[in-house]
Amino acid sequence: MNRTTRLGPALARLGLAALVVAALLPARAEAILQVVTTTEGLAALAREVGGDRVRVESLSRGIQDPHFVDPNPTLAVKLRNADLLVDMGLELEVGWLPPLVNQSRNPDIQVSGSRRLIASNAVEVMDIPSGPIDRSQGDIHPSGNPHFLSDPRRAERVAAAISAKLAQLDPAGAAYYQGRLADFDRRLDAAMVRWRSELAPVKGAKVVTHHNSLRYFLDFAGVSAAGYLEPKPGITPPPSHLADLIGLVKSSGVKVIVVENYYDRKAADLVARLSGAKVVVIPGDVGGSKEASDYTSYVDTLVRALAHARQ
Amino acid sequence: MLQLVVLSFLAAQAGAEAPTPPPAAQQAPATAAEDRKKLEEQIAKELGTQAQPVPGVTNLPGPAPAVAASDSVKGGSPFGRLLQLPDFSAIVDGALGYTSLSRAQQGLTADPLPQQLVQPLLQEVELAVQAAIDPYARGDIFITFSLDSVEVEEAYLTTLSLPWGLQVKAGKFYSPFGRLNQLHRHQWVFVDQPLSQQRLVAGDGLNGPGVDLAWLAPLPWFLEVHLAYQDTLPGFESVRQLTGVGRIIQYFDLADWATLGAGLSWAYFQAPTSTSWKNLAGADLFVKIRDPASRAYVTLQGEVFARQRAAQDLGQASWGGYGQLVWRLDREWELGARFDGAPFEYVPSTSPAPLPPGTEYGYSLLGTFYASEFLRVRVQPSWQRLPGGANGIQVFASFEFSVGVHGAHPF
């Protein structure tokens, strides 16, 4: 009787241990390449070109401001087993990614590692400061504007870089990745024709955004930013700035104020109400809203938002 | 706890027995991978080197350099040396402090205040230099200046490429004991440390030269085990002590919006010239609730400490702890409340004892305004209840700013 009593807990422990081990093993065997990205946009591109040969996970979610993700140690666990880490670069993730990489025990995903792809290295970067900078200019990105994935032309470049990197890591799948990239490019090229047509009426228009995060998409659309709700990057707008902005919106004929859905829209609503413009809320990234479920549908939402800027 | 260790060990064994093969090798016959491994071992044997690859220079090409390595710039880059500079930053903490308590009534504390005066304080200037040392390790150096001293707060290397989930920290660093103890002053939510941390652990943090071996268990959640050997000066001692520290810390994602961290710590102190030992145990809990789409969050944090000194306490344990609730309302505003309890202890030279033995309780409120990510202003009123029934009030109005590039902090 006593023996049975002792064996019970021992067996329970063994069973639990077996469950833990069983839970671990299939996860390791399921996918060929474990790709971890810092943003949902990068994850969407990795899925497009990686297909069934990769398992992709994003450290942040599309509803999050990518500047301010918590460096939760549970994310370091995802990085520990990563075969490839893809990040945006240009200091977008500087506030949270470095400690996670350091904690991960994965030497190959360090900045100089062979399993690290910094997406910004694949694109032409805008807003690179040309003179001395300091934080009196706000929390600026000293290496240039990191919000380049809203531009489908640059997304194609990043997808190509991911495809090339996957082929290096998995040579047996090189043709597969190349084929998927060609298919993605074909679909995106067709979408770009459609988007350009839809954006033609707003070409030359001006909009206001919260942060300088739509720079690349506006460049693609032929639209410019008349101003920003933030007086300087990362700085909350004081009333004096909003008053100036209301005047600017009126004098520049701005019809729309575009705000990512992770920002507080109070200031945008106020400026819109006092200037006659309209606030349009957009997802900050793929996955930032129900409609933006993949890269193409994410850009669709941006195109629809700019349609409100029609003169 | 034993079950957890057993599970971790079993899981580690499972991980060790079924490592993830290199992706290319998964597609190739197993023999190709074996041949490759044998070849590497043979080369290593003949060259007398390790078979462990150098991080980032395996058989794969490295990433493209941040600056395109093109082409022909006459005379090379004029910014070459600048690009190699480490991250430099300085963080300054200043305050106005007031207390209604006498020096003796303040007991053992890191930063005593003059009674019933509004005292300007420059609590700390921290200078940080941080960079990768080489492909294998990174270095972090923190020098702190106060009005009358300069101290190496931390100066350590951290390995980045050890196998089996291991990581070594060597140099001078905060002991891996508890949660608050490992934070620099500018990472504290409140202006001061709880009394329990100051009295039972160390006023300026348990810290000293030594080595820390940390193991990240191959589990689906975060479980890290630390074993450290250091030379420290705990708050309750006047001479440095050889110190062994152990810690287990785990983090779980309860939901997209909730994270739980739980840790157990233990330290054993022994003065080199004494046979009198001291034990210190701690348990810490941390919960963060945050809507991912928002900057607002709520954190709940608590720690309890138990100290046992063979000589002074005759083996009886002294207890203390704190609990704090912090509500970040938005990008700019934060509110907090803290409850704290610790045995009243005083500077040994104070004679006679200023108060009867017993527990001192502290109740603090906090209001913080963040002008930006690099400047915050805080106000912290506290009410203290001393053994014997006396009460005291303490108030801090503090500012903190940082300049330069400062490495991101762990969670």
Image (tube, coloured by chain):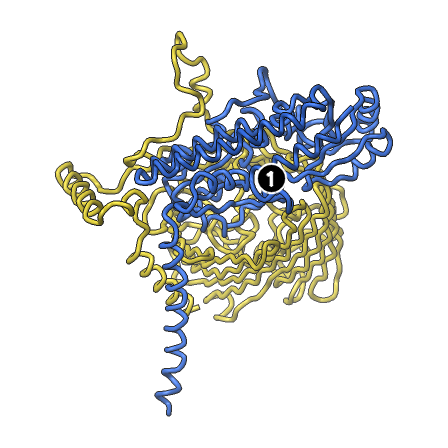
Chain colours: A blue, B yellow
Residue wearing tag 1: A297
Q: Position of residue A279 (x, y in %)?
A: 77, 35
Residue at left offset 72%, top offset 33%: A258
Nearest to the observer: residue A169 or residue B259: A169
Residue at left offset 71%, top offset 55%: B337
Q: Quadrant of residue B148?
A: top right
Task: Judge whether residue A180 can be spotted in this image.
Answer: yes
Outermost residue toward the left? B46
Q: Chain of mark 1?
A: A
Nearest to the observer: residue A70 or residue A82: A82
Nearest to the observer: residue B147 or residue A141: A141
Q: Measured along the vertical axis of the image, is residue B366 above or below residue A4?
A: above
Q: Position of residue B221 (x, y in %)?
A: 47, 57
Secondary-structure class at tag 1: helix
Residue at left offset 76%, top offset 51%: B100
Task: Judge whether residue B89 can be spotted in this image.
Answer: no
Image-based side of A66 in relation to A57, left or right: right
Outermost residue toward the bottom? A1
Q: Amino acid at mark 1?
A: Ser
Q: Measured along the vertical axis of the image, is residue B105 above or below residue B79?
A: below
Quadrant where the C terminus of chain A sits is top right
Image-based side of A254 in relation to B78, left or right: right
Q: How many marks?
A: 1
Nearest to the observer: residue B2 or residue A94: A94
Q: Measured along the vertical axis of the image, is residue B51 above or below residue B337?
A: above
Q: Measured along the vertical axis of the image, is residue B158 above or below residue B88?
A: below
Q: Position of residue B279 (x, y in %)?
A: 46, 63
